[in-house]
Image (cartoon, rainbow, N blue to C red):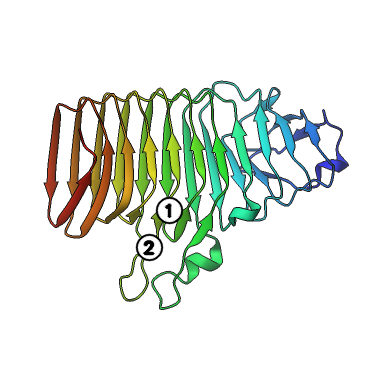
Amino acid sequence: IDTDDFAANATIDGGDGDDTLEIDSDNTGAVTQFTMSGFETIKITDTVADQIISGKNFSGVTKILAADDIGNNASFVNMGASDLTIELNGAAAAADAEVVSSDHTGATTLNYTASKATAKKGGTSSATADTNDNEVVVAGTSALTVNAGEYTKATGAITAAAATSVTLNVASGQDDDENEKTDFAAKITAAKATSVAVNVSGTFSGEVEAATASSFTVESTGTINGATIDVDAATSGEITTGDYTESLKVEGAAIEVLGITSGGVLDIDDTT
């Protein structure tokens, strides 16, 4: 729907079932506070200006979907204490990168997903990945899980200032010659996280910055390609890698115990 057709405080009822409300607004600088129930997903598409969407009177919303044609920033405010899933779908080039933010205080699951067209080419000679540079800010979330899905390349910034834990999962998506296409090249910043867990099946070339974390784990059956783990306060860590040649920079000045298991060649830089 085009939200211009509704009053900013309209009452909308999606009824039973799993429903999606698609916001495609031509209104410059739209601010809405719908009284809404029966919609589980809010989808943001080709808006012409930044959107501020209040969830004060929402009931049952569990997911925000930012489509590949998201036109401008989308800020979700008054979202309460519920858990929330945010999905970044398809490709978004750096020149078109937008910011999706939410002030909810529950846990956040952030999913990068390939477009249908890209997913359809998976496993073939023409397999590729959707590069998505959109940024995500979830300042109040209590915990952050990021899932980089197959045939995606995440390159934007993710900020979760209050999260106490961070988990990153990177899936594998290959072409017909087993060349890996999935790559998490984004940066996660979680200043208050006490633990970090990174699980890699595809490629991890990005960064996780959790300067106050007390411990971290990295487990990879894929490839770690020049990635960085910034855990200056951590006293312990565990790194397990597979049969590939891999490189990882660990910024951990306080590390006392570091366990390493590698089936191939692992180059660890800057560990102190």
SS class, disc 2: loop
* Residue in the image at 31% along x and 51% along y: 226
Depicted 132 relative to depicted 51: above or below? below
Question: Does the residue at mark 2 contact the one at mark 1 (Cβ under 8 Å)?
Answer: yes
- Viewed as shown, does residue 162 lie left or right of 88? left
* Residue 69, horizontal then vertical, whole percent: 67, 55
* Residue 139, horizontal then vertical, whole percent: 54, 26
Looking at the picture, tell me which residue is in the foreground, 262 or 1: 262
Asked if one can make out residue 38 in the rendered structure from this viewpoint, the answer is no
- Viewed as shown, does residue 58 lie left or right of 208? right
Q: Amino acid at mark 1?
A: Gly
Counting the numbered discs, the total is 2
Distance Cα–Cα, label 2 vs label 1? 8 Å
Q: Amino acid at mark 2?
A: Gly
* Residue in the image at 62% along x and 41% along y: 99
| Quadrant location, the C terminus | top left
Name which of mark 2 and mark 1 comes first in the sequence: 1
* Residue in the image at 42% along x and 25% along y: 191
Depicted 66 relative to depicted 76: above or below? below
- Viewed as shown, does residue 39 lie left or right of 118? right
The residue pinned by badge 1 equals 149
Tell me the crowding category of disc 1: few under 14, some 14 to 19, or many 20 or more residues within 10 angstroms, Cα based. Answer: many
Looking at the picture, tell me which residue is in the foreground, 10 or 175: 175
The residue pinned by badge 2 equals 173
Quadrant location of residue 64?
top right
* Residue in the image at 28% along x and 24% along y: 233
* Residue 40, horizontal then vertical, whole percent: 61, 38
Looking at the picture, tell me which residue is in the foreground, 109 or 202: 202
Q: Which mark is residue 50?
A: none
* Residue 223, horizontal then vertical, whole percent: 28, 56
